[in-house]
Amino acid sequence: MKRIVLIGLAVTACLLVLMGAGRNKSNFRLVYWNIQNGMWDGQPDNYDRFVHWVKAQRPDVCVWCEAATIFRDGTDDYMPDEEHYLPAHWSELARRYGHKYVFLGGWRDDYPQVVTSRYPIEEVARITGNADTLVCHGAGWARLRVHGKVLNIVTLHTWPQAYGFKVPKEDRERSKAAREGDYYRRSEMEYICRHTIGTLPREQAEAEYWMMMGDFNSRSRVDNWVYHYPDDDSRLLVHDYIHAETPYLDLVHERHPNDFYTTTGGRARIDYVYCTRPLFDCVVSDRIVSDDYTTPVRNPQRISNFWHPSDHRPIVVDFNL
């Protein structure tokens, strides 16, 4: 029996090593994931499976979308605000997977983004928009200093609906037909870029280390060989703006131009990591993770549109800095 236990422990150790496969100790690892309603799936087990998975990745920095607790375990019943565990306790949760530092981005509703890190985080800006353009789920701009390099990290989560932001229920069908949601997302993206990387002259921004990531809730023209949208389709507006007006490169597309990887439970790439050229040139590996834990599974009771553990898949990137 003792021998069996020892073998079992050895196998478990090997599996943990494999889960962090490709991780060179000198590399810098990013984990990005939209964790759906503050990791709603992880509430019943006190986030144990979530923490176990994150620890196995051995990340240096994590960016989490939808980083607030909203619903009671296993339901779509709203919790009272005083019962929400997240985002107030992200420092406590992050320490369980080895991260000491936490940054909460701009926060207007129940869907903020959070950055956790092994390295101290400099808080640059919490972005929520202005009277003309409200950034519905907020955005954030943080900096890390890693091996003498300054990394700018921009997080975002844009408006998810086909109808426009704050359109009354009785007018939503008209708004959807006019694709007002697409135009609203484009306005959010312009605002976020103007107040982050766009605060610098283009030549300076191109020479610095910038990454921008999140749930963009929009499709990119570079994937249109999969979607087959018309060339002037408004669903392509957000990424058309990024490609035309910023120095960012779509990391996954640039490294895998002939492949398509969904980031959801369906067939849609709506989560992206963008980098400027100096940081892109440091990338040594990237993957959209679909393992036994992260592959989305539709909630069997069809509770709202919830999936387990999330309706999105994580993205893991290694940089040699």
Image: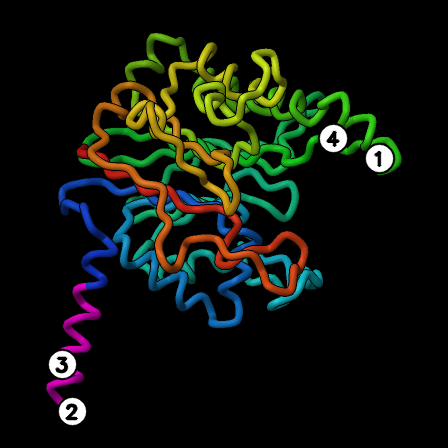
Query: Marks 2/1: CA distance?
Result: 65 Å
Tag 1 residue: 168
Residue 90, percent across and down? 46, 56
Q: Earlier in the sequence, mark 2 or mark 3?
A: 2
Residue 158, percent across and down? 58, 33
Q: Nearer the viewer, mark 2 or mark 1?
A: 2
Q: Answer with left or right where residue 127 lies relative to residue 142.
A: right
Give the numbered dot on residue 6: 3
Is 217 placed above or below 32 here? above
> Quarter holding the C terminus?
top left
Q: Earlier in the sequence, mark 4 or mark 2?
A: 2
Q: Earlier in the sequence, mark 4 or mark 1?
A: 4
Q: Earlier in the sequence, mark 4 or mark 3?
A: 3
Residue 248 visible in the displayed image: yes
Disc 3, SS = helix
Q: Nearer the viewer, mark 4 or mark 1?
A: 4
Tag 2 residue: 1
